[in-house]
Amino acid sequence: MSGTQAWGFTDDRGEQLGAARVPRRVVAYVRAGAALYDLGVIPVAVYGSGHDGDAYDPAKAGVLEAVGVPYLGPGRALGEAVLRELRPDVVVDVTYDGKTPYALDKALVERLGVPLVALSVGSELDLPAILDRFAALAAGLRVGGPGGGSAGPGGPGPGGPVTVGSEGSGPGPVGSETGGPEAEAPSATAPETAAPGTWASDAGAFEAGGPMAGGPAAGIPVADDPAAGIPVVGAPVTGAPVIVGSDAVGPEIVTPVTVSPAVGPGQGAALAEFEAAEAALREAAARSGLGVLALSGAGPEQVHLARPHAWPELAWLAGLGVRLLDPGPGPGANWLTSGWERVAGLRPDLVLFDSREHATPPYALPGGVRLAPWNPETPPSPAAYARFFRDLAEALAP
């Protein structure tokens, strides 16, 4: 396909998108942009979500900052003039509900008259399907740029990312949230709550499926624990923690990520590393048998505990044999929000803590608990998840 032929792509909202030529200038949500870079496409700029500030969040950025891709700040604060100056041919966002872009106003992109691609990162797809969708988009965009070459400082060499800027010259100059923000824990300074079965966002409450739902159930008394200095939820954790993974969800449900026509030059090695990292993690999980709890800190008095099956990567870990702890009953489809004492009640051996900048460090953990960082917005690329799997395998090792 040449750069003058028609380009088409159906995104995960079912939108059939098209352009008179293959898009060369890509503006993307930072998570999507980091994945596209790994897959061979360099955005001209990226933007953040409502939880992001005016500078890159290192946990989300991958290598984008190091290779000089400009960061525009939160997407919903962007002005139309800024995007027009960048002259994008396509904008790439993510979606959690399969209906709405997460981090950018759809109407803003419509005024620019360019396609808006929204790829699902929600629980309706498993991790390999999410990776395949980003690979398919990247394959369609790579054909519009020059064949290989250096991506700049820290970037791959020949066979690596294709620069999609003006004439392939690299990143250009920088000139109402309605989706379910499943990847975002509520802000530590202003925790968001929602009624059971819904989640909250900047635009209000939405149906269950996003992790913004949280907060102790109405009517549960909260009292100060003078010993710990944090609130104690009046309804204590009872019984043994629920384990998902291992015997409950065994490795037999896992199917390998396959090399498809969407995989371009240089991506076979990344997929091979992904599969090798899966194998290493599967072996480490089988040897350790440690109970693992994923959470997002929200200050000294509150923590958001991840429900494993609501997160594609956590569900995949369970399928690889990692013994993930479910936080138990309560409001919230993706997170259960509680005090830190609930963490102690679940008796984790290892805590995966949210490493994004808007999350806070773990508080009041039981002695001897291991810690490992977890980015709930890991770029959806085999290379990024291979790194995460390797790091977790090391954390599980004796």
Image (cartoon, rainbow, N blue to C red):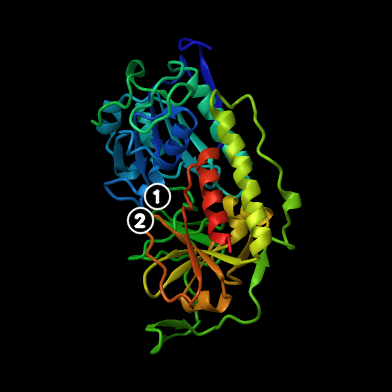
State the SS at label 1: helix
- The answer to whether residue 11 of the structure is visible from this angle is no
Residue 114, compared with residue 203, is above or below; it is: above
Residue 353, compared with residue 221, is above or below; it is: above
Residue 235 placement, left or right of 102 = right
Residue with the mark numbered 1:
59
Q: What is the spatial separation of the Cα atoms under label 2 and label 1, in whole angstroms? A: 7 Å
Q: Residues within 10 Å of mark 1 (few under 14, many from 20)?
A: some
CB under 8 Å between discs 2 and 1 = yes
Q: Which residue is at a point 55% across and 39% down the rendered structure image?
A: 382
In terms of image quadrants, where is residue 296?
bottom left
Residue with the mark numbered 2:
357
Q: Which residue is at a point 59% across and 35% down the rendered structure image?
A: 271
Q: Residues within 10 Å of mark 2 (few under 14, many from 20)?
A: some
- Which three-letter amino acid code belongs to the residue tagged 2? Glu
Spot occupied by residue 346 in the image (x, y as percentages of width and height): 57, 75
